[in-house]
Image (cartoon, coloured by chain):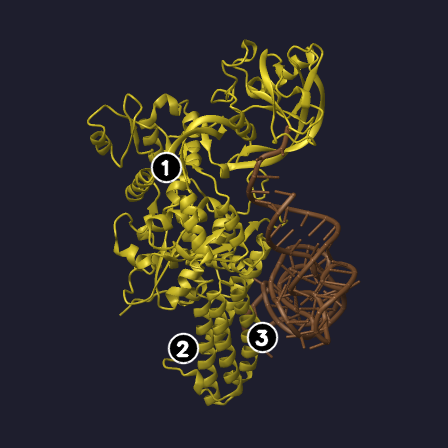
Chain colours: A yellow, B brown
Amino acid sequence: MLDKTFNPGEVETRIYAEWERSGAFRAGRRPDAEPFSIVIPPPNVTGRLHIGHALNNTLQDALARFERMRGKDVLWQPGMDHAGIATQLVVERQLAEKQQSRVGMGREKFLEEVWRWKNESGGAITQQLRRLGASADWSRERFTMDEGLSRAVLKVFVELYKQGLIYKDKRLVNWDPRLQTAVSDLEVENIEMKGHLWYLKYPIDGQAGRFIMVATTRPETMLGDAAVAVHPDDERYKDLIGKFAVLPLANRRIPIIADEHSDPEKGTGAVKITPGHDFNDFEVGRRHNLPVLNILNKDGTLNDTVPEAYRGLDRFVARKTIVADLEAVELLDRIEPITHAVPHDEKTKTVVLEPMMTEQWYLNVQPLADRAIKAVEDGRTKFVPDNWTNVYFHWMRNIQPWCISRQLWWGHQIPVWYDADGKIYCAETEDEAKAQAGGKALTRDPDVLDTWFSSALWAFSTLGWPDQTPELKRFYPTSVLVTGFDIIFFWVARMMMMSLWFMPDVPFHTVFIHTRVLDEKGVKMSKTKGNVVDPLDLIDEYGADALRFTLALAAGQGRDMRIGPSRVEVNRNFATKLWNATRFCEMNGCQTVEGFDPSKVTLTPNQWIVAETAATAQELTTKLEALRFNEAAGAAYHFIYDVYCDWYLEIAKPIFNGSDEKAKAETRATAAWARDTIFQLLHPLMPFIPKSFGRARRSPRVRPC
RNA sequence: GGGCGCGUAGCUCAGCGGGAGAGCACUUCCUUGACAUGGAAGGGGUCACAGGUUCGAUCCCUGUCGCGCCCACCA
């Protein structure tokens, strides 16, 4: 006899362990079946399961289980990302607690430290995914830094280098002064902030008492000014073009130039040009052959190119000092409040990034993007919902070279060596590089690759590439990619590019972009706001199935969903309803009848429920095929409550209590069949409950004889 | 400045050419007969606004207003 309620906790864990032990999730068990594959968006090795992961993996798991149930040979490929910056920060923080530092211990020891951390504390998330019920093939779990994937990274780098697509360039990059590394354009988060517009007067050289006024949000960069630009048609300044201004504080002569970049409507119409610290100004400088002055050290303090008084000052301290000094010599005209977008680091959103002149490695992605665009244009890869197609196209069609080098230690070290003359040798191994160099002493480039470089290869590197493995042959291209819109550029686009460059076909046929999860009030969850809903708490309280079902039900076509305990509670109640329907069946002797043929039932209610069950089965299948998770879940919900319980079981009661034994038998068999059928259909969304009955029912074992 | 999404019951949202729906909340009733983590009955909506297409529009088109997000180098 079943309890009145379903207690998921312990049962779920046990069921999962049995599945895993029995190899139920293994790919390749059905060599004759049609393959179906999904690669997981690899969570960070530092990661803990958050509600977004829960959604993402619930949907993937639903598909994996659905297709497995339909007889396909399913590979759900799991793995983790080494997450360069995040992981390095975690370990550095721990070292700091022990009064140690990365720089102090040196690269090699530091990396040992990171690996140790990874092996001991990393990857907690894979256990948490198991708790959710994720039926990934864990026997094939990969890590972006493991041997095989690292080999793929080296090979890709070397090939792209040989093809002339990877090159070193000195230009402005987005620089993070705290981490002291370059970051890519995508890793910049522009945040609207209140700031000021300072109006500065630059004296005109040789015309005492005359000034040209510029407006700037960044007065400290004036020490790096190379010119003042005005619009060529701006009557106000026409006579000044070709003249010189005297840069205050620095006492340098800088030219007044004409450039279309100057907008007469903005500021004063005259704009200071700082090629070393502004992307626009860099372009202007290039057009006019202006010198590029870098006034900052890597940590954001002012360097030795500036007047002595400012050297070593932090950029924000320097700003105050410079403003004060300009005011003192009456060259500050006024200050206006302004709100403007300030570039920040995307991880902590607390560090203001600097455009900085450095030498970095770039990947010219243009030719790869062309293929990636074509593939979507041709429909070889489709976005669902398809409005994301335009987002993808827009970015791909305006793509810029990808800055792939990072000044970190944790990551794939760039496979480039230099001889004493700085000549470059790019090879997969040091020995090869040495051979190329004719045995000269070499030093390796210290930089590592952007984390996304290795994840861009994920769709084929996890399958064994560069080796031509059977898995690669069988499971590539993958069937569907399930991910959130926040990483379309970071990851989806780059996988498209890299895959199409190194593989004969697209990495996946369908990209399903799911909604974003917000808290119950519709606010983005964040640790600092303290509104994070922990999926593990929800699982503990309501069961994994209830959470999964809630997420599936909320995975509509909109942009985001709101999730909180109250919504999960509703579906815990649904689980209880299922449980009690089964309990009712059991109490009335409804048992699965071998060889039961639903088309042969004779009583009207039974004929009706058979038809309803079949219709629901059909609907669930159609909806899951169409990736309409919410509609699939909704159909199941409606069937259980409104059809099976409210009507059918109610109608069955008098039959069970009556004396017509034949009717009873048929109804019992039909009730059991309908229940079994719907449980089976529910399996992709709620894998645990249908499995739980047997265990819960089992009475304490007497001795087997 | 471009692009996208959203505006439907008090709240959260689904539906998207022909019946206006779900969950929660609310009202009334029901503790012995699967389930109070439940059941029965019920109240509540000019489907943002204005035009248009159509025999017919919440659903399609145009515009307006409001909210949110993404992209963009603007002082």
Q: Which tag, 1 or 3, sits closer to the chain's start? A: 1
Image-based side of A166 in relation to A620, left or right: left
Q: In the rendered image, which quarter contains the C terminus of chain A?
A: bottom left
Q: Which tag, 1 or 2, sits closer to the chain's start? A: 1
The kind of secondary structure element at disc 1 is strand
Tag 3, which chain?
A
Q: Which tag, 3 or 2, sits closer to the chain's start? A: 2
- The foreground one among A651 and A30 is A30
Q: Badge 2: how crowded within 10 Å, few (<14), some, or many (20+)?
A: some
Residue A628 location (% of width, % of height): 52, 63
Kindly identify the amino acid type of the residue bearing the numbered disc 2: Thr
Which residue is identified by label 2? A592
Image-based side of A198 in relation to A633, left or right: right
Which residue is identified by label 3? A646
Q: State the CA–CA distance, disc 1 to disc 2.
A: 64 Å
Image-based side of A63 in relation to A469, left or right: right
Instruction: Determine whether A377 is above or below A344 in the image.
Output: below
Is residue A240 at all visible to an observer of this figure?
yes
Is residue A132 at all visible to an observer of this figure?
no
Q: State the CA–CA distance, disc 1 to disc 3.
A: 65 Å
Looking at the image, do the residues carrying marks 3 and 2 touch, with CB atoms under 8 Å apart? no
Kindly identify the amino acid type of the residue bearing the numbered disc 3: Asp
The kind of secondary structure element at disc 2 is loop
- The foreground one among A473 and A239 is A239
Tag 1, which chain?
A
Instruction: Determine whether A301 is above or below A437 in the image.
Output: above
Residue A467 location (% of width, % of height): 25, 49
Tell us which disc is closer to us: 1 or 2: 1
Tag 2, which chain?
A
Which residue is identified by label 1? A166
